[in-house]
Image (spheres, grey):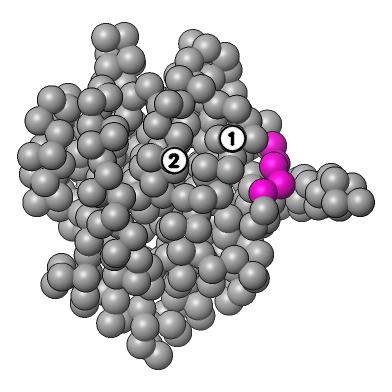
Amino acid sequence: MKRLLSLLTICIMSLTVQAQSWVDSSRYPFQHRFIELEAGTMHYVDEGSGETLLFLHGTPTWSFLYREFIASLSQSNRCIAVDHLGFGLSEHPASFDGRPESHSQNLAEFIEKLDLQEITLVVHDFGGPIGLGAALQHRDRIKRIVLFNTWLWETKHDAGAQKIDKIVHSGLGKFMYLRMNFSPKFLLKKGIYDKQNLPKEIHRQYVYPFPDKSSRQSLLQIGQSLVGSSDWYQAQWEQLDQLASLPWLILWGTKDEFITVDYLRKWRDRLPDARVKEFECGHFIQEEKAAEAIREMEAFMAL
C-alpha cells in the first residue's frame, strides 16, 4: 500500500509539473523525474552518462540555476540536479520543517536511493551546508567538490547574520517573505552584480515557484535557519577534515554582497590546496559567468 501511495504521489506531481506552463522548457529542456523520500516528493533531473555530478542550489533558486551547466557538462558526464523540498518543482509538504539539516538528511537519502558513487559534488549558498552535511554521511561516495559562494561554520556571532535573523523573525519580515515574495523578487536581484545578467524572463523562473503564502514558507524557514541552525553548521565544519583531502575547486563571485570575500579567505585558510578561481560578479556566478565557470569545472575534472 505504501509503495502504491508513493507511485500515486509521483504521478500526481508529474501531472502538476506538466500543468505548470510557466516552466521555460526552451531553457530547461530536461526530463522531469521524481523520487519519494521520507519527508516528501523530490523533483530532480538526471541527464547524460559518465562521471556523476550532483548540483545543489540554495535559496531562493532551484535546479534551473544550473541549466547551462547541465546542458554542457551532460555531453560527457551524468548530471543530476535536485530541487530541495519546498523549492522549484518539488513538493511543498506542510509537515517539513525546512531546516538545512533536514534538507541535508533528504539529500543523504536521495544519494542512497540512487546509489550514487564517485560523486563530484557542486554546492552553492545554503546548498553548501546541505550538500557538505550529506557528504560527511557518505564520505566514501564523494570524489571531488566544487564550491560556489557558501559557508560551513557558526553564524550566531556574525553581525550581518544576526541582522538578517532579526528581520526574518519580525512581523515585517514575515510579511515581506510570505506576502510580498521578497526573497526571489528582490533579494535575488540584489545578488546579481550586473543586472543585465538577469533579464525578466529568467527572473520569472525564480519567482513563479512561489505563487502564494503557503508555498513561501520554505523561503522563510530556511531564512530563519541562517542563525537558527548555527550550531549544526559548526558541527559540520568541525568534521570537515574528513573531506579536506579531496580535490576542491572554489569558484567565487567577488562582488557578492551576501557571502563576501571574507568567507573566501576562511575557505582558503581551511583548504590551502584548493584550486580557486575568482570572478568579478555577484552571488550567482551561474547566471553571470556560467560559460567561464563551466570551463573551470571541465579543467578541474580533467586533472
Q: Find out whether residue 242 is within the magenta segment.
A: no
Specify start and end residues of the magenta stretch as a single range.
33-37
At x 66%, y 64%, the residue is 93
Image coordinates for residue 135, horizontal then vertical, percent: 41, 38
Q: Position of residue 73 (x, y in %)?
A: 45, 19
92 lies left or right of 63: right
Q: Please say if 226 is above or below 68.
A: below
Q: What residue do we see at 40% from left, 31% from top?
A: 139
* Position of the C terminus by quadrant: top left
Tell me the kind of residue under disc 1. Answer: Glu
Q: Amino acid at mark 2?
A: Gln
Query: Label 2 vs label 1: CA separation?
Result: 10 Å
| Residue 240 coordinates in the image, percent (x, y) | 26, 41
Per the image, the residue denoted by label 1 is 112
Q: Quick one: 241 or 280, which is closer to the camera?
A: 241
Q: Give the camera-side residue of 191 and 161.
A: 161
The image quarter in which residue 47 lies: top right
Predominant secondary structure in magenta? strand
Residue 70 drawn above or below residue 109: above
Residue at (71, 47) in percent of width and height: 36
Q: What residue does disc 2 label?
A: 137
